[in-house]
Amino acid sequence: MMDVESVASVAIESGLRLHRHLGPGLLESVYESLLAATLARGGFSVERQVPVTITYDGLTLKDAFRADLLIESNLIIEVKSVDKLAPIHSKQLLTYLRVSNRPLGLLMNVGGMTFKEGLKRVVNAHHGASSLLRVNAQPA
């Protein structure tokens, strides 16, 4: 199994190629399907629409949300197809990382004119990586 940074690097390259080839304007589900298939073809373990359970104060909420893509059981990718990312999109991914105890997530918006403007790395207690968002792995 590759380290999460190497997996993220390949995922970013795959997302960039996808955006360059197709451009913006398709449904989010199309980009998600194609990115998943591309990464799986590259030999990665890829799960789509992964249900995640939240446990809080002795309560369990099964299937509280679904992560778009889970790569190599470590990297969550959330795919968006909007004109511009909103702050809530990064917060959503950060919450997904926290409750699933995963180190790194990528927010990929393929709806913008450039892939670079729609790419965000979100880190959860993952030391040695730079990010705009960083939290402790312990519950708040």
Image: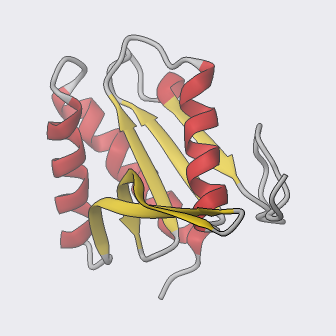
The answer to whether residue 79 is left or right of residue 128 is left
**Rendered residue at 77%/37% (across/down):** 132
* Front-most of residues 128 and 134: 134
* Front-most of residues 52 and 1: 52
Image x and y of residue 74, in percent = 52, 72
73 in relation to 125, above or below: below
Q: Report the number of numbered marks.
A: 0
Image x and y of residue 80, in percent = 36, 31
114 in relation to 99, above or below: above
The answer to whether residue 23 is left or right of residue 98 is left
**Rendered residue at 66%/69% (across/down):** 58
**Rendered residue at 47%/88% (across/down):** 1
**Rendered residue at 43%/37% (across/down):** 108
Image x and y of residue 23, in percent = 23, 23
Q: Please say which color scheme the image uses.
A: secondary structure
64 in relation to 88, above or below: below
Image x and y of residue 34, in percent = 17, 49
Q: Quadrant of residue 128?
A: bottom right
The answer to whether residue 91 is left or right of residue 114 is right
User: Which residue reaches farthest bottom?
Assistant: 1
